Image: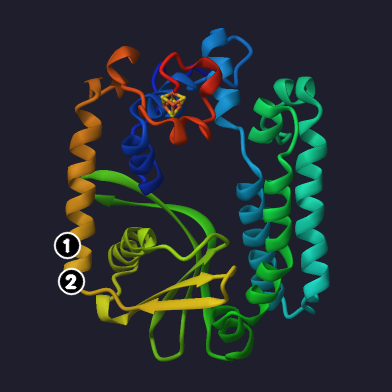
């Protein structure tokens, strides 16, 4: 029996999907619909291009991913009772990851043939080089993030407490809200000996209040998936650039707010569907552009978007 790909992607909801939907409807269309099946050599050229553009990354994202991987490895070593790397070793790992991304980005044709295996930086794809100021900005964050990761409240607690059970590290999970599948990926989830479930979110960017909704969503997930009472959940954002740990305990209002947000977001997204059963979108022209040059400037789909500013 041969594998037959569905003409439209499976429907699902995530906070990042909601954020893109609000930032630019056209970008949302390219990312979630136009790129579908573009990994196949038999796909239409438009889908192949959209899929490759969707895979573009940038220096800040590569830095963030490298720091997350370093944190993941630390926890993995703790689970296996093995020695931890030094700060210098972590710095070297992050630097090498960024260098590899730069080197791979020089080989455009190879990336085009294997977009899942190789990295292409947005900066290299659209500008042909790395802007000096961005290289300096990202470079200056490497050792700061490594130092603050090792000194963070969460890592020190995980490393030093004997009664910690690590439950999830960077695992894509789903749960159901309003009969819809919701995807989440927690950086770290662990349970302390006193029964508190701690969610840790590593951030390599500046301190922001926009992170709250994400953490409430995570708390809702813990509550629904593990059946944990809300008052037994602690959420933390470890801002590794500033070395600040922001802690909070969600309450019933926070949970209701995020439930309400999911419901409203689902309704808005579905109003852009021609057929909700097949997840078939309205025609592309119905997905308006952002109308904001500052959004278009960093968009992956500039090459194919007639709406760009
Ligand atoms: S280029 Fe601008 S208008 Fe076009 S998809 Fe990207 S953000 Fe939206």
**Quick check: 90 above or below 152?**
above
Q: Crowdedness of circle 2 by 10 Å Cα count: few (<14), some, many (20+)?
A: few
As drawn, which residue projects farthest toward the front? 133
At 66% from the left edge and 46% from the top edge, which residue is drawn?
A: 59
Residue 2 visible within the image: no
Q: Quadrant of residue 277?
A: top left
Left or right: residue 174 versus residue 144 is: left
**Quick check: 262 above or below 74?**
above
Q: Crowdedness of circle 1 by 10 Å Cα count: few (<14), some, many (20+)?
A: few
Which numbered dot is residue 256?
1
Left or right: residue 78 versus residue 274 is: right
Could you say whether the residue bearing mark 2 is in a helix, strand or loop? helix
At 54% from the left edge and 8% from the top edge, which residue is drawn?
A: 44
Q: Quadrant of residue 29?
A: top left
**Quick check: 104 above or below 107?**
below
Q: Mark 2 highlights which residue?
A: 252
Of residues 192 and 262, the one nearer the viewer is: 262
Left or right: residue 18 versus residue 66 is: left
- Label 1 CB, ligand 1: below 8 Å? no
Q: Position of residue 236 (x, y in %)?
A: 43, 74
Left or right: residue 61 versus residue 118 is: left
At 31% from the left edge and 38% from the top edge, which residue is drawn?
A: 22
| C-beta proximity under 8 Å, tags 2 and 1 | yes
Please state the total of marks drawn on the protein image: 2
């Amino acid at each position: 029996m041969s594998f037959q790909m569905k003409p439209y992607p499976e429907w699902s909801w995530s906070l990042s999907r909601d954020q893109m939907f609000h930032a630019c409807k056209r970008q949302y269309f390219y990312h979630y619909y136009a790129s579908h099946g573009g990994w196949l050599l038999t796909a239409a050229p438009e889908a192949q291009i959209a899929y490759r553009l969707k895979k573009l990354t940038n220096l800040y994202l590569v830095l963030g991913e490298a720091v997350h991987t370093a944190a993941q490895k630390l926890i993995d070593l703790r689970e296996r009772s093995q020695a931890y790397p030094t700060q210098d070793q972590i710095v070297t790992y992050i630097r090498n990851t960024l260098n590899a991304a730069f080197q791979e980005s020089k080989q455009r044709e190879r990336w085009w043939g294997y977009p899942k295996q190789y990295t292409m930086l947005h900066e290299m794809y659209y500008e042909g080089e790395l802007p000096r100021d961005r290289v300096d900005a990202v470079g200056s964050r490497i050792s700061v993030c490594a130092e603050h990761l090792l000194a963070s409240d969460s890592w020190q607690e995980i490393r030093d407490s004997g009664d910690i059970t690590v439950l999830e590290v960077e695992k894509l999970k789903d749960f159901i809200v309003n009969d819809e599948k919701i995807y989440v990926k927690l950086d770290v989830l662990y349970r302390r000996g006193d029964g508190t479930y701690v969610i840790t979110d590593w951030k390599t960017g500046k301190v922001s209040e926009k992170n709250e909704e994400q953490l409430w969503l995570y708390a809702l997930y813990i509550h629904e998936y593990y059946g944990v009472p809300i008052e037994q959940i602690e959420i933390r954002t470890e801002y590794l650039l500033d070395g600040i740990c922001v802690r909070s305990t969600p309450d019933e209002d926070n949970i209701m707010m995020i439930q309400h947000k999911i419901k409203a977001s689902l309704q808005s997204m579905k109003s852009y569907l021609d057929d909700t059963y097949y997840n078939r979108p309205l025609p592309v022209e119905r997905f308006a552009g952002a109308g904001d040059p500052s959004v278009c400037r960093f968009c992956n789909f500039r090459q194919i978007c007639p709406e760009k500013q």
